[in-house]
Amino acid sequence: MNDKLAQLDKDVKAAQSSADNAWMLVSAALVLMMTGPGLALFYGGLVRRKNTLAIMMQSFALMALITVMWALVGYSLCFGGSGPVIGGFEHAFLRGVGAEPNPDYAGTIPQMTFMVYQLMFAVITPALITGATAERMKFSGTVLFMVLWFLVVYAPLAHMVWGKGGFLNASLGGRFPTLDFAGGTVVHISSGVSALVCALYMGKRSGYPKQPMPPHSLVLSFIGACLLWVGWFGFNAGSALAAGSLASSAFVATHFGAAAAALSWSAAEWVKNGRASALGAISGAVAGLVAITPAAGFVGPMPALIIGAVAGVACFLMVTKVKAAFGYDDALDAFGVHGAGGTIGALLTGVFAQQVINPIFGVGKSVGGLDGHWGQVGNQLVGVGVAWAFALLGTFVLLKIVDLLTGIRVPEEHEMEGLDITQHGEEAYNLET
Amino acid sequence: MMKLEAVIQPSRFESVKDALREIGVEGMTVTEVRGHGRQKGHTEVYRGREYTVDLLPKIKLEMVLPDNLVNRVVDTILKSAKTGKIGDGKIFLSRVDEAIRIRNEERGENAL
């Protein structure tokens, strides 16, 4: 009888593990799809024709570069060890990462799956920054900067917020438990704020803002944004790290946040310009997806609508008013959408998080402000502040170093000719051949 | 021989071409061009940045005609290209000294 029960127990666990693992492998693939082709198309359509391949190639290069870095030391720095700021080297070269689950993070799936899933986040985060440096950053400088940025900014932030013992971790012993379900601070604030630093350090594109620089193909951007929306289900619902009801909740919140933001950006545009544009609608959806990212596994559908609606209008104002007022050339609005949207989302998560959705602080303990725990907004502020500070300082220092070693910016005549030809020796469109 | 150049609205091109074929015009060269006369362009807005597009797409027809056909062709284009709004385009006529068919070196109106 006992043998039979033990066998049954084993079978049940195996069945759950299979189900969770299936969803997590699909989620990992969905998140990779967000970088290529999702982000590559979204950004690719927004640049001028002569820079199409260059911006796509930056995303693609990161798919390869960060993957190799991840295998060597990246995973271990983020999720090995239990220091307050950075992980250790216990999983360097993926030592000890195999079929057995890592119960600290995801007890029902092979650690191999958890490792490859988290890798996809590390890939897309630096790729988001290329939106600010578009049309003028050297390929060599991009490669060096991104490798260093991954080590100096991403890995510590990911460990602080998600790693065991990290001082911002919400469930594994953090001093300031910051709620970040899928990357509001780690992914969007880190990349968005770094994007702003890059835009300020590099200066404006030659001719900006006098010369017109309209997107060369909103069709590409449209396809890219729709792929991002779909991929985001892997990003957010996958962050439940299992296929249970929390994944459903995060899936729903993600979708509703995106929809509300698409509407609110469009409405703001309609009021201002008398028309709703396709670029506005897809930009709004992305802004909503960004803002709902930290909140996805903590809030219900109605707060998700509110978070999305707020983010849509706020990001619209960022890219139309604030950018123009300060005059920085965040070419494709990486800061305006990811930095601003991520900050808003992270703070509103502290307001709307609910224990009925995710009792992360223990059963019966309220989570967010409206749940009765306003101190959480303070924790979120600490998390946001740390992410901003890390991104600001780290990026500035790295830009200085890279500028000395390889240079950051292409010469003006290369900028005129376009990065496709000068950086890669090819053209996106040879329509007459 | 006269050379006729007409810059017209792209939306009228098919009608003009059909009307010219009906009156016996045998050849023409067509290019897609951009330009403007008195017509003002339009404004496009991308994430709050406004661009004035003042060079608008037009179609340019070029043909060299025997003298006896010139008036009929001009009338036909006027009739078939007109919408009555600013931006309908213009017709330019100029004299041509010589025409040579490359295949057999025929010259003058025989080469047209």
Image (tube, coloured by chain):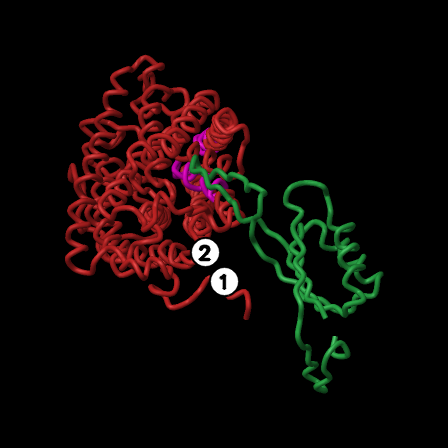
Chain colours: A red, B green
Of the numbered discs 1 and 2, the one sitting upstream in the chain is: 2
Residue at 67%, 68% (x, y): give it.
Answer: B95
Mark 1: give few (<14), some (14-19) or many (20+) Cα within 10 Å: few
Q: Label 2 amino acid?
A: Arg
For marks 1 and 2, give the CA distance. 8 Å
Residue under label 2, please give it: A49
Q: Is A275 left or right of A368, judged from the image as shown?
A: right
Residue under label 1, please give it: A429
A385 up-or-down from B31: above or below = above
Image position, residue A232 (x, y; %):
45, 40
Image position, residue B61 (x, y; %):
67, 61
The quadrant holding residue A314 is top left
The majority secondary structure of the magenta stretch comes to helix
Mark 2: give few (<14), some (14-19) or many (20+) Cα within 10 Å: some
Q: Check if residue A251 falls in the magenta segment.
A: yes
Chain of the residue where label 2 is placed in the rendered structure? A
Q: Is B64 left or right of A256, judged from the image as shown?
A: right
Chain of the residue where label 1 is placed in the rendered structure? A
